Amino acid sequence: KTNEAKLLTAQCVARWPDDPISHLDAAFDLNQSGKPDDAVTRIRRALELAPDHPVAAQQLVALFVKQKRFAEAVIACREALRITPHDKQLRAWLKKLRENEAPF
């Protein structure tokens, strides 16, 4: 994203702090900017606002895997599967995580 787009995302979070999509967009920007811990915080906020948001749940798993935080990824993956129990990709990720492998 351009700096202008990142600024717009930050403004959306400030203007609509209870909008989970704004927090997901901010998480993407933060991760792209090399701030993965801040991105996790934003995704967790999105999940607080919308506990059954499937994209937020999947993004949390992906971010934990990218950071090699595999124990947290397993927990997040189980929670994501609670939301979307028939998600084949999440099931494959959980299997690989249980085998101590990165799913991607």
Image (cartoon, rainbow, N blue to C red):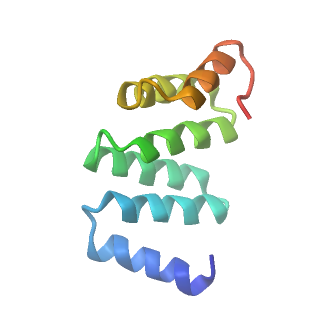
Which residue is the extreme one toward the top? 99
Q: Is residue 39 visible?
A: yes
Residue located at (42% from left, 24% from top): 85
Residue 59 appears at what percent x and percent y?
Answer: 53, 45
Q: Nearer the viewer, residue 8 or 91?
A: 91
Query: Is residue 81 shown above or below 26?
Result: above
Image quarter (top left, top right, bottom left or bottom right) of the C terminus: top right
Q: In the figure, is residue 33 to the left or right of 82?
A: right
Q: Is residue 97 above or below residue 25?
A: above
- Seen at 28% across and 47% down, the residue is 50
Q: Would you place residue 65 above or below residue 18 in this image? A: above
For the point 63% across and 23% down, which residue is it? 92
43 lies above or below 14:
above
Looking at the rendered structure, the number of numbered marks drawn on it comes to 0
In the picture as drawn, the residue positioned furthest to the bottom comes out as 4
Q: Position of residue 42 (x, y in %)?
A: 43, 54
In the rendering, at what x and y percent does residue 95 appear?
A: 63, 16
Residue 24, image quadrant: bottom left
Q: Quadrant of the N terminus?
A: bottom right
Q: Is residue 67 visible?
A: no
Q: In the drawing, does residue 99 fall left or right of residue 58?
A: right
From the top left corner, tell me how far across and down residue 72 is, in percent: 54, 28
In this rendering, position of residue 2 left or right of residue 19: right
The image quarter containing residue 28 is: bottom right
